[in-house]
């Protein structure tokens, strides 16, 4: 038997090893609205190809609106619009921020032209609307997932350790939110693709979120305790309720369709805020940084 008990981990004076992210809630809102835009663009392209004008209109306008709000939150957090423009001076494939910036640049014109065709009856605008919408839909998966890659390439333990799961969480969340918008805005006869996308997106998000809790080891405590846990719990409840509604009563009742769509939208937003809060919490306790490193060395 050892005479000296096994030592417990402590940092110097109990101080954090990492500085918490300086990002505010605006970044969490940016994560949600960008994903909403991508999901809506993909849904709009499918609605255009299958002859669902009301669903197409909702998706195109939602894609542009989500992108505009997302860019507002991003530029506001950066402090000066010139900082976003400066990122366009280089293209660095190894930098998630650089890749994400160019993805937004590639995505924006297609989403904008497609949405413009819904409010302007000009013939030329309508001719380019379908190619523009299809281009935006092709870039949309990258727009939906690049923010997860961006977060997971930081030193924040809760984000870095979840680098395999976060892209699936964000992509599923984007699909669910885009579907929720379609269910709210489109009539029942045209909202079938939105209902199906809502079920698939919600399922992907819920499964990936569960994998985050089970495969991160001790770092998963940042997701399952405190404010992050409360946000993610409500996100899971609302997303599950929205998916169940989309698969059942939303087919027959307009009120149920709107309620299910709003539940999917709220669940997606809370999921992004929950991931954001988990990352902030994981930087405040030094054990999330040092203990996994020691275990890997062992």
Image (tube, grey):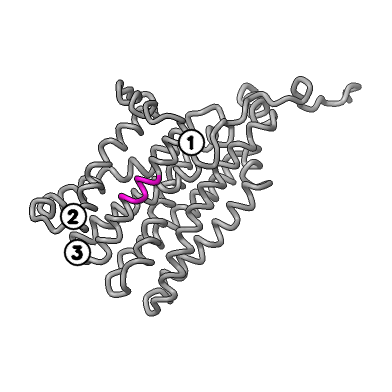
Give the left or right position of residue 134, taking residue 240 as reference: left
Q: Can the viewer see residue 50?
A: yes
Q: Main secondary structure of the magenta part?
A: helix
Which circle's residue, 1 or 2, is located before the other in the chain? 2
Q: Position of residue 74 (x, y in %)?
A: 43, 37
Q: At 33% from the left edge and 22% from the top edge, which residue is drawn?
A: 92
Which circle's residue, 2 or 3, is located before the other in the chain? 3
Q: Which residue is mark 2?
A: 117
* Image quadrant where residue 287 sits: top right
Q: Quadrant of the C terminus?
A: top right
Q: Position of residue 100 (x, y in %)?
A: 36, 33
Which circle's residue, 3 or 1, is located before the other in the chain? 3
**Residue 149 included in the magenta stretch of the image:** no
What is the magenta range?
64-69
* Image quadrant where residue 8 sits: top right
Q: At 64% from the left edge and 41% from the top edge, which residue is drawn?
A: 222
Q: Quadrant of the N terminus?
A: top right
Mark 1 element type: loop
Q: Position of residue 176 (x, y in %)?
A: 41, 57
Give the left or right position of residue 164, taking residue 183 as reference: right
Q: At 35% from the left edge and 25% from the top edge, which residue is drawn?
A: 87
**Label 3 Cα crowd, 10 Å radius (few <14 / some 14-19 / many 20+):** few
Q: Which residue is mark 1?
A: 163
Q: Which residue is mark 3?
A: 50
Residue 262 versus residue 167: which sits nearer the camera? Answer: 262
**Label 2 Cα crowd, 10 Å radius (few <14 / some 14-19 / many 20+):** many
């Amino acid at each position: 038997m050892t005479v000296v008990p096994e030592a417990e981990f402590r940092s110097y004076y109990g101080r954090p090893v990492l500085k918490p992210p300086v990002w505010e809630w605006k970044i969490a809102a940016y994560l949600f609205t960008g994903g909403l835009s991508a999901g809506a663009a993909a849904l709009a392209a499918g609605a255009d190809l299958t002859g669902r004008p009301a669903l197409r209109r909702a998706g195109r306008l939602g894609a542009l609106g989500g992108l505009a709000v997302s860019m507002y939150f991003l530029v506001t957090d950066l402090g000066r619009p010139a900082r976003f423009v400066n990122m366009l001076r280089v293209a660095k494939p190894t930098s998630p921020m650089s890749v994400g910036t160019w993805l937004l640049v590639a995505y924006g014109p297609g989403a904008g032209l497609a949405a413009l065709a819904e409010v302007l009856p000009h013939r030329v605008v309508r001719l380019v609307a379908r190619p523009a919408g299809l281009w935006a839909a092709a870039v949309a998966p990258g727009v939906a997932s690049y923010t997860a890659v961006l977060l997971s390439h930081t030193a924040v333990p809760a984000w870095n350790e979840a680098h395999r799961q976060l892209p699936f969480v964000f992509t599923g969340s984007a699909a669910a939110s885009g579907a929720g918008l379609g269910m709210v805005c489109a009539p029942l006869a045209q909202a079938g693709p939105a209902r199906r996308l809502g079920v698939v997106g919600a399922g992907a998000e819920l499964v990936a979120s569960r994998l985050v809790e089970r495969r991160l080891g001790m770092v998963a405590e940042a997701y399952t305790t405190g404010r992050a846990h409360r946000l993610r719990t409500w996100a899971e409840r609302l997303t599950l309720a929205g998916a169940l509604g989309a698969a059942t009563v939303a087919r027959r009742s307009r009120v149920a369709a709107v309620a299910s769509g709003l539940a999917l939208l709220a669940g997606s937003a809370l999921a992004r805020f929950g991931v954001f809060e988990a990352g902030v919490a994981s930087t405040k306790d030094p054990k999330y940084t040092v203990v996994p490193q020691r275990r890997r060395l062992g």
